[in-house]
Amino acid sequence: MTTNNQRKVDETVELLRGGVEKITASEQFKNYLKFLSAFSQYSANNILLVFLQRPTARMVAGYRRWQELGRQVNRGEKAIRILAPILRKAEDEETGEEARVLSGFKVVSVYADDQTSGKPIPLPPSPRNPRTDACSEQQAAFVWDRLSGFCEKEGVAVSLEKLDRGGHYGSYKRGAKKIIINEKLDAVNRATTLCHEAVHHLLHSRYAGHRDTQEIEAEGAAFAVLCHYGLDTSSFSFPYLARYAAGTDKLPPALETIRRAAHTLIEEIGGDRAAGLPKGLCPEGGRMTKPKPSPKGPRTPEGAAAARRYNRRR
């Protein structure tokens, strides 16, 4: 990739950082985080217990806690049973000071948010789909074609399938080496989803890290790649990333991985900026600019192995 292209990708990653920070600093998101802070952190066992008893639950709390938050458990609702620790006072053998130690567990009752009514529950900003018009559809077609070629060379099958889960855009099946895209998506969202899942393959085909970190890396790199080719996904990417990065320090360490993945995938896709397509929407320096067209040419053999070289460097 040319130094100029590297600079533009780096600028886009900085735009990404600023956009996520703006979302997480908004009053709407502050209210959401303040609400979440009222809930205890549950163990993996209790999360499983909640899921088995109430799969639709997004958050749970005790009867009194819901009242403190301005909501009331609906009449006739069945409680969710989870485990709470039993602590007893004991003397610390080393310091001689009084301490609280775990002596066992007891069953307690909690209720899910959808079992209550009252004061509205603050929700985080929702991602919005990228704009769709004739220009962006042409750009999306180019990205889809090149990414499909990349996946084919990597031995990753790409298929359009019916996905019943609401809001489910697509998924990467690491074991099966397969990317599934929701067939109901329009051309632009198919391309942007394929880019997200292709980054998952590039970065996460050999290890399973924390899901939050994986999603931050995949959507962050996809945003930078798509912006390079004139597709502005900030209305979707920034809130999406904010959900996974809010209240954590996961975004800053991920930025270098995002940069390297974006550089690698752009090298693999080929073409310069919008690859000779009509005027696009790539934010640069805080304003919308027209990508410079460049002659189309064959893909280089070096680009074909870009992803594999990247994985070896990791």
Image (spheres, helix red, strand yellow):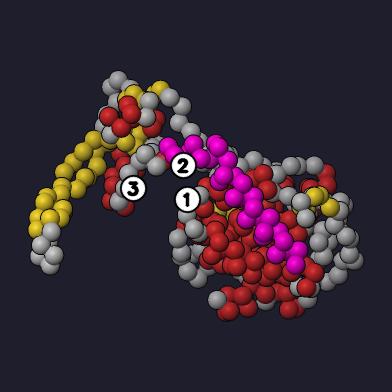
The x, y position of residue 137, in whole percent, is: 78, 47
For the residue labelled by badge 2, is the local secondary structure a helix, a strand or a loop?
helix
Q: Earlier in the sequence, mark 2 or mark 1?
A: 2
Q: Which residue is mark 2?
A: 33
Extent of the magenta region: 7-35
Image position of 62 with respect to 266: above or below? above
Image position of 243 with respect to 298: above or below? above
Residue 30 falls inside the magenta stretch = yes
Q: Which residue is mark 3?
A: 41
Left or right: where does residue 7 sit relative to residue 87? right
Residue 214 falls inside the magenta stretch = no
Amino acid type, label 1? Gly
Q: Are marks 2 and 1 in contact (CB under 8 Å)?
A: yes
The residue that appears at 82% across and 58% down in the rendered structure is: 274
The residue that appears at 31% across and 52% down in the rendered structure is: 44
Crowding at mark 1 (Cα within 10 Å: few <14, some 14-19, many 20+): few
Q: Earlier in the sequence, mark 3 or mark 1?
A: 3
Amino acid type, label 3? Gln
User: Taken as a whole, is the magenta stretch helix, strand or loop?
Assistant: helix
Q: Which mark is residue 290?
A: none
Q: Which residue is mark 1?
A: 247
The residue that appears at 33% across and 47% down in the rendered structure is: 41
Q: Earlier in the sequence, mark 3 or mark 2?
A: 2
Q: Is residue 141 visible?
A: no
Give how far apart the Cα atoms at labels 2 and 1 are: 8 Å
Q: Is residue 287 visible?
A: yes
Give how far apart the Cα atoms at labels 3 and 1 are: 14 Å
The x, y position of residue 162, in whole percent, is: 58, 44
The x, y position of residue 129, in whole percent, is: 66, 42
For the residue labelled by badge 1, is the local secondary structure a helix, a strand or a loop?
loop
Crowding at mark 3 (Cα within 10 Å: few <14, some 14-19, many 20+): few
Q: The N terminus lies in which quarter of the figure?
A: bottom right
